[in-house]
Image: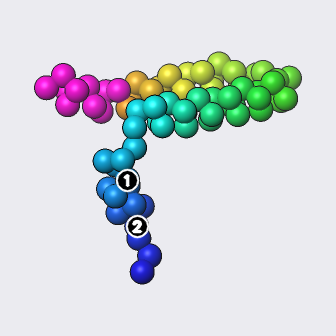
Amino acid sequence: MSRSFSQRWNRLRSEITLQDLVLDVTGKVLVALGLGAIFAEHIKPYAGVTIFLGLALSVIVKAKYWKRFWA
């Protein structure tokens, strides 16, 4: 029987730690930095857009959970 992503997440949610999430995000950031270094000249014109989109995504997620966090 195949499990859905939500079923898998619900099973792991209680086991995952903040340290695991931080390590995962750090790894992804390092990959992005490495790729950025490799393709720096080619992606330079899009740097501002990339930074803006990254900040916008962060703000969207923070806004989504803001009230729940401070409740």
Magenta residues? Answer: 62-71
14 w.r.t. 59: above or below: below
Residue 5: which quarter of the image?
Answer: bottom left
Identify the mark at residue 12; answer none if there is no mark.
Answer: 1
33 part of magenta stretch: no
**Residue beneath disc 2:** 4
Is label 1 in a helix, a strand or a loop?
helix
Nearest the viewer among 16 and 57 is: 16
Q: Pointer 1 and pointer 2: residues touching (CB < 8 Å)?
A: no
Residue 51: which quarter of the image?
Answer: top right
Give percent across and percent down for residue 59.
Answer: 40, 24
Which residue is drawn at the image coordinates 85% and 29% (left, top)? Answer: 38
Nearest the viewer among 58 and 42 is: 58
Q: Is residue 62 left or right of residue 22?
A: left
Q: CA distance from mark 1 to mark 2?
A: 13 Å
Amino acid type, mark 1: Leu
Amino acid type, mark 2: Ser
Work out which residue is located at the far top of the displayed protein and give it.
48
Residue 63: which quarter of the image?
Answer: top left
